[in-house]
């Protein structure tokens, strides 16, 4: 359903998701993401996030609501750029409903997402 | 099997239902302009009835009426009782009837779900805007998606033009029956109402056009977004209030149509 990994040299937290999620999956994901993110910040300092959602399905409304509820806590862990990559315009629209903070951006192309994370063109 | 007479009665109820919805949309717009409330689209206005006393009963009546209206529009497009020509103008008119029928079917479904309490009431007052963005995203994901969204923009622009034509000419008044011509103020109500609808449709067409240009579904929008765009202009408070008043007058004219409009539903397979 999801994997969360941290690359130390690039200080990038990478999330890969796939399939349909349930509320239970979302809750487990949120807990693990916040724990891993907090640990990464403590040990490695500021980090960026790359969320590869290209294999994820269009999620039920309750899952999107749960992810939106998680975001305020997630944004306290990192204020650095967060890039999500999705496979369709509909997925992009859905993702932008919860990734709407100034440091978040959703892409249809993973190279564009990586280039944005590596660039200096980020909101303060 | 429902008879033509009953279907005609339901279509007239549909004009009344449409009238109530537009009066509510107009009311929300004026309230937003003058007292800082939130604008609502047609679905949001229907949703607002759910919490009222006798809400489910009112919603059931609204649902039946909107269904009747939708059936009338669809049978008009299919049977062509007005003998609309097969030229481009005539074809566009019949396509418009189909689109209107489908749009009112969706509204009827929204009202029915709320009446039966089988669907949860959307917390948003503009679910129509979210639907517009969702459908835009679906179209953008198709081959030639931007062209498809552009075609939608053109379709809405044509509808805006038709509404504007009605406002300008005022010949819609001929659809009302009666021995004496309708009072002048009735025609004025209708012209202001159609004018307000033309303005809203024009802005919605612009939003779809922007979405097609930018390839961003989030740029698309519906009635509530259009009203919010008006509100954000210089002098927006009064622009929104006047447009809301216009939409409410359209609703009032629809109530008059429910009583006096000449129409007959000719269901396939009935005498």
Image (cartoon, coloured by chain):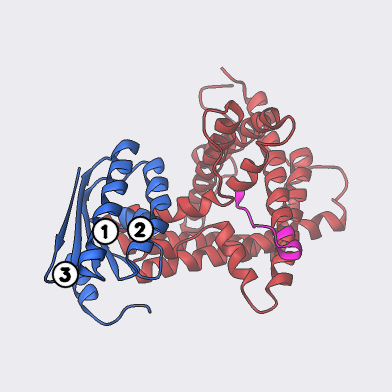
Chain colours: A blue, B red
Furthest residue to the top?
B1
Give the Cα separation between the discs numbered 2 and 1.
Answer: 8 Å
Is the residue marked by circle 3 packed among few (<14), some (14-19), or many (20+) residues within 10 Å? few
Question: Do the dots labelled 3 and 2 sit on one chain?
Answer: yes
Q: Mark 3 points at which residue?
A: A111
Q: Depth check: A62 or B55 in front?
A: A62
Distance between the alpha carbons at the discs numbered 1 and 3: 23 Å
Callout 1: residue from which chain?
A
* Farthest bottom residue in view: A120
Q: Which of B41 and A21 is in front in this view?
A: A21
Q: Which chain carries label 2?
A: A
Give the class, few, some or many, for how many residues have Cα within 10 Å of label 1's Cα (few <14, many ≥20): many
Q: Residue at x 74, y 51 (%)?
A: B174
- The percent coordinates of residue A101 (x first, y second) are 41, 66
Asked whether the residues under marks 1 and 3 belong to the same chain, the reply is yes
- Mark 2 or mark 1: which comes first in sequence? 1
């Amino acid at each position: 359903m999801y994997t969360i990994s941290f690359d130390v040299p690039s200080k990038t937290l990478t999330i890969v998701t796939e399939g349909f999620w349930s509320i239970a999956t979302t809750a487990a994901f949120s807990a693990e993401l916040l724990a891993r993110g907090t640990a990464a910040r403590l040990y490695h300092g500021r980090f960026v996030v790359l969320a590869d959602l290209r294999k994820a399905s269009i999620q039920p409304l309750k899952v999107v609501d749960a992810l939106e509820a998680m975001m305020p806590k997630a944004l306290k862990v990192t204020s650095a750029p967060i890039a999500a990559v999705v496979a369709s315009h509909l997925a992009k629209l859905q993702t932008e409903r919860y990734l709407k903070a100034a440091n978040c951006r959703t892409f249809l192309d993973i190279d564009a997402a990586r280039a944005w994370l590596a660039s200096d063109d980020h909101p303060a | 099997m429902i008879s033509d007479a009953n279907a005609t009665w339901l279509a007239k109820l549909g004009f009344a239902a449409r009238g109530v919805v537009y009066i509510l949309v107009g009311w929300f717009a004026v309230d937003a302009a003058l007292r800082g409330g939130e604008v609502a689209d047609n679905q949001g206005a229907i949703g607002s009835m759910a919490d009222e006393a006798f809400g489910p009963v009112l919603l059931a009546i609204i649902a039946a009426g909107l269904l009747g209206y939708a059936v009338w529009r669809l049978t008009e497009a299919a049977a062509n009782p007005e003998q609309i020509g097969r030229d481009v103008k005539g074809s566009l008119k019949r396509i418009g009837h189909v689109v209107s029928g489908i749009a009112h079917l969706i509204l009827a479904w929204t009202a029915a779900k709320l009446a039966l309490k089988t669907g949860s009431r959307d917390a948003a007052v503009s679910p129509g805007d979210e639907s517009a963005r969702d459908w835009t995203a679906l179209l953008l994901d198709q081959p030639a998606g931007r062209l498809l969204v552009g075609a939608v923009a053109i379709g809405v622009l044509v509808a805006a033009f038709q509404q504007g034509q009605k406002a300008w000419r005022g010949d819609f008044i001929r659809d009302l029956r009666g021995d004496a011509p309708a009072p002048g103020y009735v025609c004025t109500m209708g012209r202001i109402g159609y004018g307000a609808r033309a303005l809203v449709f024009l802005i919605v067409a612009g939003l779809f056009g922007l979405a097609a240009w930018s390839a961003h579904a989030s740029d698309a929008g519906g009635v509530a977004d259009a009203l919010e765009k008006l509100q954000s202009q210089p002098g927006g408070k009064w622009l929104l209030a006047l447009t809301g008043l216009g939409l409410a007058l359209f609703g009032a004219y629809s109530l008059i149509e429910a009583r006096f409009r000449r129409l007959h539903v000719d269901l396939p397979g009935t005498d």
